[in-house]
Image (spheres, rainbow, N blue to C red):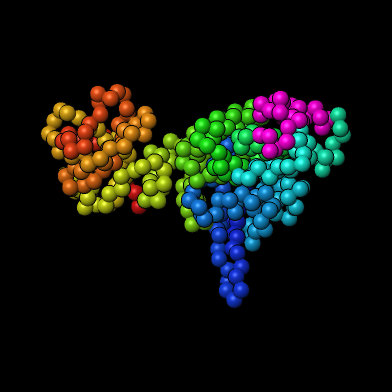
């Protein structure tokens, strides 16, 4: 039996004189105990609303949300045993770090000695034990987000919900904090649902990903499955930087009849000085460890990603090269 089970969930926002705007309808998903699951998708696809429905912050129109066999829908947020971390830190500015973290325990009427012990334990877990006496205005954004995480963990929730908690942070802090969140989640064996629109975060952090679009879960699976086997054009366009070709363009490029849409990963295309020079480099961009080329081959424009081994390997704009494609990397998409 699944630890979290969302069954036929429906939600729409009412409007005067109309039937309302549906956010999602007939959402079904199962999450196992201890899993780290990510809801991934573009803005407005319903992922944050789904998270808020699970937390009890947004009412549902129909359906069930089961947590360890208990239907959460009739329960208030305070009785669900769920911890939630928001994009905004939502810290009390007049309270110290220790007081902010202890606030939930105070609401649960945990005695002072137990509360202090648990607060110190969780501050150590998020590496903030030296900041207990500071106020939010004395902390960086990453530190504030760790306080918010500690405040959710200290109540020992049955389920942890994270609603784009890293999106306001700079890239270096975001990378460090996502590694820290994943490590803590594994240490505690805490079932976690994470919302993001950042594909890299989803691919690197998740046990499983639920890819959402227009109020539906269009594909679910581990990172490798979503990246290497997208089910449709949306999935291929959202995960990675696939080259999406219609049948005519694919037939021209591959020089054989193709009957449907084809998706080709940019790293599955090879450029070489050896062979027939059938590809023209139009432009290139340096992305750190990867050089992204925009090339034209047999009348078809493609994106090609090449590992940046050394400056000597860089191909100049206007250069003609041989192009080859790994046939196992071709993916038919609906």
Q: Residue 143: where, in percent of width, then height? A: 64, 33
Outermost residue on the bottom side: it is 17
Is residue 204 depicted above or below 310 in this figure? below
Instruction: Assess whether residue 120 is covered by the magenta stretch.
Output: yes
| Residue at (17% x, 28% y) in the render | 273
Is residue 330 toward the left or the right of residue 165 in the image? Answer: left
Q: Nearer the viewer, residue 83 or 248?
A: 83
Quarter of the image with the N terminus in it: top right
Q: Residue 163: where, in percent of width, then height? A: 60, 45
Q: Residue 308: where, in percent of width, then height? A: 32, 27
Prevailing secondary structure class for the magenta stretch in the rendered image = helix
Determine the image quadrant of residue 225. Answer: top left
Instruction: Assess whether residue 191 is covered by the magenta stretch.
Output: no
Residue 327 appears in the rendering: no
| Residue at (67% x, 49% y) in the render | 55
Determine the image quadrant of residue 108. Answer: top right
Q: Nearer the viewer, residue 42 or 30?
A: 42
| Residue at (51% x, 41% y) in the render | 209
Q: Residue 187: where, in percent of width, then height? A: 64, 27
What's the magenta region? 114-139
Is residue 258 toward the left or the right of residue 121 in the image? Answer: left
Outermost residue on the left side: it is 276
Is residue 208 toward the left or the right of residue 80 in the image? Answer: left
| Residue at (33% x, 34% y) in the render | 286
């Amino acid at each position: 039996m699944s630890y979290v089970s969302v069954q036929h969930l429906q939600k729409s926002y009412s409007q005067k004189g109309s039937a309302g705007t549906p956010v999602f309808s007939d959402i079904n998903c199962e999450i196992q105990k201890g899993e780290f699951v990510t809801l991934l998708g573009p803005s407005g696809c319903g992922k944050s609303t789904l998270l808020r429905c699970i937390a009890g912050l947004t009412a549902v129109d129909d359906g069930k949300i089961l947590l360890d066999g208990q239907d959460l829908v009739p329960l208030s947020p305070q009785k669900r045993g769920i911890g939630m971390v928001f994009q905004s830190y939502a810290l009390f500015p007049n309270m110290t770090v220790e007081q902010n973290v202890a606030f939930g325990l105070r609401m649960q009427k945990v005695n002072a000695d137990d509360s202090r012990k648990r607060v110190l334990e969780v501050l150590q877990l998020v590496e903030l034990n030296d900041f207990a006496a500071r106020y939010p205005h004395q902390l960086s954004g990453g530190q504030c987000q760790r306080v918010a995480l500690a405040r959710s963990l200290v109540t020992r929730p049955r389920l942890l919900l994270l609603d784009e908690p890293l999106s306001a942070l700079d890239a270096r802090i975001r990378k460090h904090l996502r590694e820290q969140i994943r490590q803590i989640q594994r240490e505690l064996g805490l079932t976690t649902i994470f919302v993001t629109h950042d594909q890299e975060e989803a691919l690197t952090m998740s046990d499983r990903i639920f890819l959402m679009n227009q109020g539906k879960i269009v594909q679910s699976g581990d990172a490798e499955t979503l990246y290497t086997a997208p089910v449709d054009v949306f999935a291929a366009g959202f995960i990675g930087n696939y080259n999406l070709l219609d049948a005519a363009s694919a037939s021209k490029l591959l020089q054989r009849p193709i009957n449907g849409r084809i998706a080709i990963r940019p790293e599955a295309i090879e450029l070489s000085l050896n062979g027939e020079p059938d590809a023209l480099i139009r432009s290139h961009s340096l992305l750190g460890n990867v050089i992204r080329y925009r090339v034209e081959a047999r009348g078809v424009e493609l994106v090609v990603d090449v590992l940046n081994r050394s400056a000597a390997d860089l191909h100049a704009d206007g250069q003609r090269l041989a192009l080859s494609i790994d046939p196992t990397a071709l993916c038919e998409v609906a």
